[in-house]
Amino acid sequence: MKIIVGVKRVLDYNVKARVKSDKSGIELANVKMSMNPFDEIAVEEALRIKEAGNADEVIAVSIGASQSQETIRTALAMGADRGILIETDELLQPLAIAKLFKHLIDKESPGLVILGKQAIDDDSNQIGQMLSVLTGMSQATFASKVEFDGDHLKVTREVDAGLESIKVSLPAIVTTDLRLNEPRYAKLPNIMKAKKKQLDIIPVADTGVDVSTGLKVIEVNEPPKREAGVIVKSVAELVDKLRNEAKVI
Amino acid sequence: MSTLILAEHEGGELRPATLSVVAAAQAISGDVHLLVAGKDAKGVADKAAKIAGVDKVLLADSADYEHEIAENLAAMIVSVADGYSHIFFAATAAGKNVMPRIAAMLDVSGISDITEVRSDDTFVRPIYAGNAMATVQSSDAVKVVGVRTTSFEAVAAEGGSAAVETVEAAAISDQVSFVGQELSTSDRPELTSADVVISGGRGMQNGENFAMLDDIASKLNAAVGASRAAVDAGFVPNEYQVGQTGKVVAPNLYIAVGISGAIQHLAGMKDSKVIVAINKDEEAPIFQVADYGLVADLFDALPELSAELDK
């Protein structure tokens, strides 16, 4: 069985996003970019499934600009077998990304697709669910545990009131939550080896997929700023302020 | 134009999130309809009909909707979706699970986590953990939208008198089945709708120490939350997590204890009305968003706070 994992190149999670002065988006020139943290968890899970003998091949897929090759190389250094980049300089909406993933799934026929539940840049949390509809593959989002049970998966999901378990038939699409695993670091020899692994680049135009969508970003603004507050000297002063100044208790 | 909302409910009661989604939908032209799908859900539908501003309730009463299985709910929604210009969901775990399916089934873009309705086709949503706000416009025939419930003040649960119309349940998926759940049981208010939230971070050191927060929460009728670091360390379960990828809260009072204030945590609480930070590191970024900061060891401050609240 093949596993496809999605890996997105995003602004590093430790870097604070700065809005461009022309309000067109976020400043991404000369800032540290990394693999979306949820996608690192997706890669790790795929590797563990392969190591447990439940899969033969892990394919890391990215959709984005040419520099996304670095993100795929990171996945290859972690242990993925080969990579595919669907190259586009456009910022595509989740529906378009889901359609491009479907295009690859039709060609590769994976038994399992593992995606991050959301990317920490646009915070959409949509692609896994959309891809389930487009491909007819089962959906298991926000996974904190994935267990094989014959031709089914038992997936423990993080929901608002706690945990829920569902059983889904394969092929399936799983999206990762934070507690699914702790991703490994790529070791230096593996980083060297990853440079020789196969990485196919497909221009988005060659896929024949219509990536136009009905949603456009008009402008991006700074959020309202909070005023800096005061430092109180004691617990007694704090409680006094909350009672008599802020009047919230 | 009219808006269809998937009502969320459990144990025979509507979740408060639905009242906030109704508020968001009222900013859209036309009627507001609620779909109540559930097992023995007539009682919930009757309650939904009383919500202020709701014009009609659709009731799909079937054991197939006992659990919130995305495939089944999505099929149900799409079976009644004809004619609606907008389909709204709460941006809860359940809503996020279904909303993008509806968008894909209708071949339109989903619009996640809106915090503002500018017009019938234009919305504002946070991106980059709330460090930027994107204004987006949709030209799709149907706007499929997730609503950040803390950004819209809940409408009144009483005062309306909508008709309840029973609709046929849709076909269900044979690809997925419900196995079980482990839900937290607590007498405290629910985290996302509590007036006061007290959260602990890595500084709490272990799960047992959260009892100190529980004690204070009891005195303030507060919900208890946590930072990702505290959840990852196993101090408390996942449902406590406040942040970019956990729950977003906006209570009247948020007390952050032993939380440094990573960008990802701030994303989940910075819209709180009053923020208090208790941290022994005066350089902690949490102090930059706090209205009241107390530089102190939490193991000294919490017992003092508990005693002071008794006065």
Image: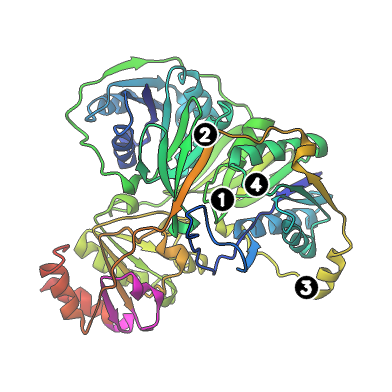
The span from disc 3 to disc 1 (Cα, nearest Å) is 26 Å
Q: State which chain disc 2 sits on.
A: B
**Mark 3 or 1, nearer chain start:** 1
Q: For the N terminus of chain B, which image quadrant?
A: top left
Is disc 2 surrounded by few (<14), some (14 to 19) or many (20+) residues within 10 Å?
Answer: many
Q: Is residue A22 magenta?
A: no
Q: For marks 3 and 2, give the one nearer the viewer.
A: 3
Mark 3 or mark 1, which is nearer to you? 1
Name the chain under label 1.
A
Vertical position of residue B47 compared to residue A205: above or below: above
Residue occupied by mark 1: A118
* Residue wearing tag 2: B69
Amino acid type at image mark 2: Ile
Look at discs 3 and 4 and give the one toward the viewer: 4
Q: Secondary structure at mark 1?
A: loop
Is label 2 on the same chain as label 1? no
Q: Which callout, 3 or 4, points at the residue further toward the start of the chain?
A: 4
Q: Is residue A193 left or right of residue B243?
A: right
* Label 2–label 1 contact, CB within 8 A: no
Dot 4 crowding, Cα within 10 Å, few <14, some 14–19, many 20+? few
**In the rendering, which numbered label is found on residue A22?**
none
Front disc: 4 or 2: 4
Q: Secondary structure at mark 4?
A: loop
The magenta stretch is B279-300
Report the residue marked by disc 3. A187
| Circle 3 chain | A
Q: Position of residue A191 (x, y in %)?
A: 81, 69
Q: Is residue B130 left or right of residue A14?
A: left
For the C terminus of chain B, which image quadrant? bottom left
Residue type (three-letter) at the residue carrying disc 4: Glu
Q: Mark 3: which amino acid?
A: Lys
